[in-house]
Image: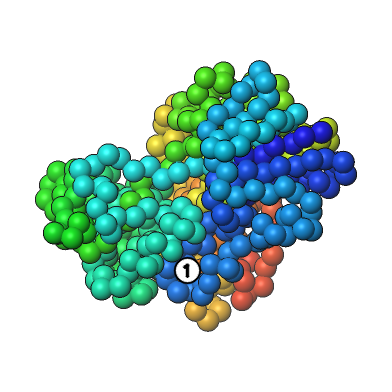
Amino acid sequence: MKYVIIGGDAAGMSAAMQIVRHDESAEVTTLEMGEIYSYAQCGLPYVVGGLIDSFDSLIARSVETFREKYGIDARVNHEVTSVDIEKKVVSGEGFELSYDKLLVATGASPIVPPWDGVDLKGIHSIKTIPDTKALMQDLDQVNHITVIGGGYIGLEMAENFVEIGKKVTIIERGPRLAGIFDEEFSEKIGEEAIKQGVELKLNESVESFEGDDDGRVTRVITDKGHADSDLVVIAIGVKPNTGFLDGTGIHLFDNGAINVNPFMETNIEDVYAAGDCATQYHRVKEQDDYIPLGTHANKQGRTAGRSMVGSPRPFQGMVGTSIIKFFDLTLGRTGLSEAEIEKLKFPYETISAQIPHIAGYYPEPKKLDIRMSYHTETERLLGAQVIGEAGVDKRIDVLATALYHKMRVSELEDLDLAYAPPFNGVWDPVQQTARRL
């Protein structure tokens, strides 16, 4: 059986490992357009900030490991540009390869609009190790950096630039940072940015860039003014890498992601997809969605690999859980925001509370801000958000588990959660908030 996998990162290599473990006679070929396999993209901002001292620390397994230890024909600099569904052949410059089963795990790429001047030196996006190396090599003599986009990547990059002593401006076309949070919490995130010396330009849209005689960016032009900059990072989102599938008949989501079922199968027999190039089923929305995260990519890759070798275990979906560090705050959310709930037209209410993350009498308690939204007819939890300096991760994971199992808010009070004064109050903040129902 010839298995071909397009893409050598989280989803692709998770699938490859399942195949070699379940099919001893498998011929597995992986085609990676770059030169680096299986690394932690989420750690890239922290290499920029100096918290992680080497890109090598981010690499889970080298290409040599896949070749020599696992017998995978792991190829580099192989960009697939065409798939022939009828002949079962993939091809690119200088190669053509037949397959019995195919997995598309090509990930996503940063969105870079065709702004005037976007090709000037000093304008970067960040998604891969080579992207990040190029950015870091460009930091000499840079004092003022403009980050375009106030989402997760924009916030993480802004924080790490401040950590290495740079002046930072964030330009966000929306009215607030971190738009996936409810407005009340987005305001807290904005306040933290300002407290840390980050300049915010909200409700501003980038129109173009200006440069000097050497062709290096010096200014970002917006619809409301400008921002003088020595370097620019564009972080306004990503798009699935699926353009090469045009004409194949593979069904795509509205943003170009590949539609898959719980076994990562596409509508074309023997063609699978997983990771940032594919959809994910949202258990709260009860419909396909697109939330590209490493957690989903690894799970979907594992699912795809098992499906391809005939040992299927379905991907059970996700609930939209995420968390980031932003200076002194941790920002966590799971499920639906109020805006998403309103779009789905669910009847809902939101309860909120501010509660210490540990026993109030124990030294150095930190306040947790918690919001929970619930369906008013069923009391089913629909979404939750937690922000604070400590204890956010534990609470957001409890709430994510509750969402996964479709729990009612009132049922949270019955959970048997860990308690000791250094770690919690006798009633966990999640339970204290739920009791306000």
Total marks shown come to 1
Residue lying at the far bottom in this picture: please name it: 363
**Residue 370, image x, y percentages:** 48, 55
Q: Is 266 on the left-hand or right-hand side of 201?
A: right
Label 1 crowd (10 A; few <14 / some 14-19 / many >=20): some
In the depicted structure, whether residue 320 falls above or below residue 284: below
For the question of whether residue 284 can be seen, the reply is no
In the depicted structure, whether residue 91 falls above or below residue 43: above
**Residue 123, image x, y percentages:** 29, 55
**Circle 1: element type:** helix
Residue shown at the point (66%, 18%) measured from the top left: 86
For the question of whether residue 43 can be seen, the reply is yes
**Residue 96, image x, y percentages:** 63, 33
Residue 219 in which image quadrant:
bottom left
For this rendering, which residue is in front, 156 or 308?
A: 308
Which quadrant of the rendered structure holds the N terminus?
top right
**Residue 343, image x, y percentages:** 42, 29
Residue shown at the point (48%, 30%) measured from the top left: 243
Residue lying at the far front in this picture: please name it: 94
Residue lying at the far right in this picture: please name it: 24
Query: How was this image coloured?
Result: rainbow
Mark 1 belongs to which amino acid? Val
In the depicted structure, whether residue 53 falls above or below residue 28: below
Residue shown at the point (42%, 68%) measured from the top left: 48
The residue tagged 1 is 47
Residue shown at the point (47%, 68%) measured from the top left: 47
For this rendering, which residue is in front, 338 or 49?
A: 49
Residue 195 in which image quadrant:
bottom left
